[in-house]
Image (spheres, rainbow, N blue to C red):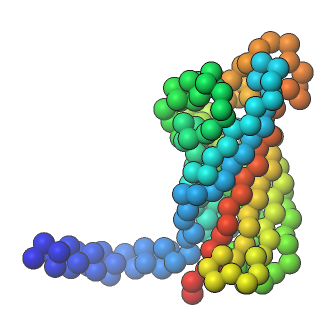
Amino acid sequence: MKIKKLCVVFFALLLAFPSWKLRAQNIFRSKHGTLSSDATYFGYSVTADTKAVEVLLDYETSDIILMLNPKVLHTGKDSIYQLLKQIDYIWALRSNLNLGSINTTTHAPQNFQLTGILELPPNQKLNIKGTSRLEHIGGGEEMACELAFYFDLDLGSLGISPSTGLSRGENLMKVQFFETVLKKVN
């Protein structure tokens, strides 16, 4: 009986708010985006990576949000792991790919500039600039495109100050993000 009532409430909400149903068809969601970053930490080269970046991509507007819990980054370094596990907030990158709608059918590779805002609590916002690429994957049933972002991030802006006297290049984290985008269901 409870299931029947729940179904009635759900369908009533869909009727009351029809844009919910339509909007959901325009959004790609994933919790498996891949992020890799390279930085210098106390003079040592360190790579941090994860396959747990949450992605929301609107196929119609090309708005995108990437969310990352820093605790899921793997570095193989205990001292860095201890720093990351103390961070109790999510990093969110908001951007628009400036592609209009996302075409998930066959298309030539699209290279474009990435501009966005990286949101870090408490109320800190960093401008992000980099390059991006959307490339069609042929022959897949569900997979349609590979989306990639490349940008640099100042470690100090993340509250990571490994040591003093670093040159600008040593204080930068090089970030690469990859996600396989599924075909849009019409």
Farthest residue toward the left?
A: 1
Nearest the viewer among 178 and 74 is 74
Q: Is residue 47 something one can see in this rendering?
A: yes
The residue located at (80%, 71%) in the rendering is 135
Which residue is located at x 61 percent, y 24 percent? 78
Image height of 82 relative to 174, above or below: above
Q: 125 above or below 82?
A: below
The residue lying furthest to the front in this view is: 76
- Residues 11 and 173: in front is 173
Q: Residue furthest top?
A: 164
* Spot occupied by residue 67 in the image (x, y as percentages of width and height): 57, 49
Report the residue that reaches farthest toward the bottom.
Answer: 186
Residue 89: percent from the left, percent from the top?
51, 36
Nearest the eye: 11 or 31: 31
The answer to which image quadrant residue 8 occupies is bottom left
Which of the 4 image quadrants contains residue 158?
A: top right
Q: How many marks?
A: 0
The answer to whether any part of residue 61 appears in the image is no
Q: Quadrant of the C terminus?
A: bottom right
Residue 176 coordinates in the image, percent (x, y): 76, 49
The quadrant of the rendering that contains the N terminus is bottom left
Q: Position of residue 163 (x, y in %)?
A: 77, 14
Which residue corresponds to the image point at 63% horizontal and 56% vertical from the top-left? 33
Residue depicted at x 61% and y 65%: 57
Looking at the image, is 14 positioned above or below residue 147? below
The front one of 85 and 119 is 85
